[in-house]
Every structure is written in structure tokens, then in C-alpha cells.
Amino acid sequence: MTDKKQPPSRAANPFLDSGFYTRMRDYTERDAAFSKELKAIGESGAGKQSTDARFAPSLQVLRGVVKKGLPLEEMLARIVKGVESGLWEAWLTAFGFELRGVNYAKTGERNARLALDISLGSKAHTAFANAGVGNWRSLVVEDCAQVQIDKPTEKAPAKAAAIFFLDAP
């Protein structure tokens, strides 16, 4: 009889509960609330539930927002098609995304790697706030493939990103 190793379970993130998030925000100042949520995100890690940015439920709010003349949903579709490659980075930056890697070949899948800024000053915050989704960072992390968190320094605040893909394998 052999013991099969179970993968370690993820730590629970209490900020996924919007009621908890709202109660916490009622008595915690903005920077401290962000720090607490970021700590919980770091402990729980990426949920990997829907790693393709075109389909992730947590990004639905962003996909409908129009910037630079196009909704994000259309921008992502054009990236996958491989058209207008010179505009991709500018398009994504308007939403708080960074294009971290992409296959620019004219044929085949794009295999783009996108990093959504989930830091305190993220450009995505406004869209989520307008939609009434306060705990958007925790929700986004449930869908993403990876989470990157850079600790704050004396000169720079904490930086965090949720990594998504296009044409994920």
C-alpha cells in the first residue's frame, strides 16, 4: 500500500467574501486594508480557475470597458488573431495590463502572457469600483495562473500582478 501525496491545499482568503471585505473596509484605512488583502492573496496564491483573460469571470467588468476606442474584449480578440501588433501594449496599458510575453508569429496561437496590475494604484481599480466590486483583487487572483508580489521598499510601494494567458494550452 502506497500513500499518494496530496497537493498542499491553498490557504483560505477571507477577502473573497464581499460581506467580509465591506465590513473590514468600514473600520480599516485604505492602505492597511490593501496590505491585509495582499497578505491574504500571497498566502492563498493563484486559484488557476480560469487563466485565459478572454474567459475569466473575474475580468468580465474589464472586458466591457472601452478605452482607446475599443472594449478590452475586442482588444484581446485582436491579439489572439495577431492583427495590429504594434498597438497591443498601448491598448493593454490603458486597462492596467502589461504584455509580459507573446508569440508574434503570423500563424498559430499567440500564447500571450498578460500581467494585470493589482497594486494599490492600479488602473483597473476604477472600473471595478464603478461596478461595485470592492474585493476585485481577490476575485481576480482566483482566476489567474500566477501571482507576483514584490514587497514594498523605502522608495517604492508594494507591487502585485495577476498573470493571465491568451490561448492557454
Image (tube, rainbow, N blue to C red):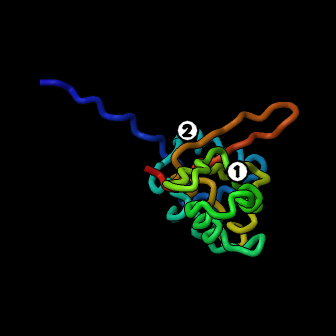
Residue 64 x %, y %: 64, 74
Comparing labels 1 and 2, the label whose residue is closer to the camera? 1
For the residues labelled 1 and 2, the Cα–Cα distance comes to 24 Å
Residue at x 55% of width, y 43% of height = 146
Residue linked to disc 1: 98
Secondary structure, mark 2, is helix
Task: Tell me the crowding category of disc 1: few under 14, some 14 to 19, or many 20 or more residues within 10 angstroms, Cα based.
Answer: many
Residue 41 lies, with reference to residue 152, above or below; the image says below
The amino acid type of the residue labelled 2 equals Glu
Is 53 on the left-hand or right-hand side of 130?
Answer: left
Q: Which residue is mark 2?
A: 43
Residue at position x 72%, y 34% in the image: 151
| Residue 127 in the image, given as x and y percentages of width and height | 71, 68
What's the residue at 54%, 64% (across, down)?
54
- Where residue 98 appears, as percent x and y from the top left, is 70, 50
Q: Three-letter amino acid code at disc 1?
A: Glu
Q: Earlier in the sequence, mark 1 or mark 2?
A: 2
Residue drawn 63% across the image and 45% down it: 101
Quadrant in the picture for the N terminus: top left
Q: Secondary structure at mark 1?
A: strand
Q: Is residue 71 left or right of residue 20?
A: right
Does the residue at mark 1 contact the one at mark 2 (Cβ under 8 Å)? Answer: no
> Where, by quadrant of the figure, is residue 159 drawn?
top right
Instruction: Using the rendered image of the protein, determine whether residue 4 is visible from the camera's viewpoint.
Output: yes
Q: Is residue 117 visible?
A: no
| Quadrant in the picture for residue 94 | bottom right
Q: How many marks?
A: 2
Percent from the top left, x then y, of residue 142?
Answer: 51, 53
Residue 44 higher or lower than 16, as above or below: above
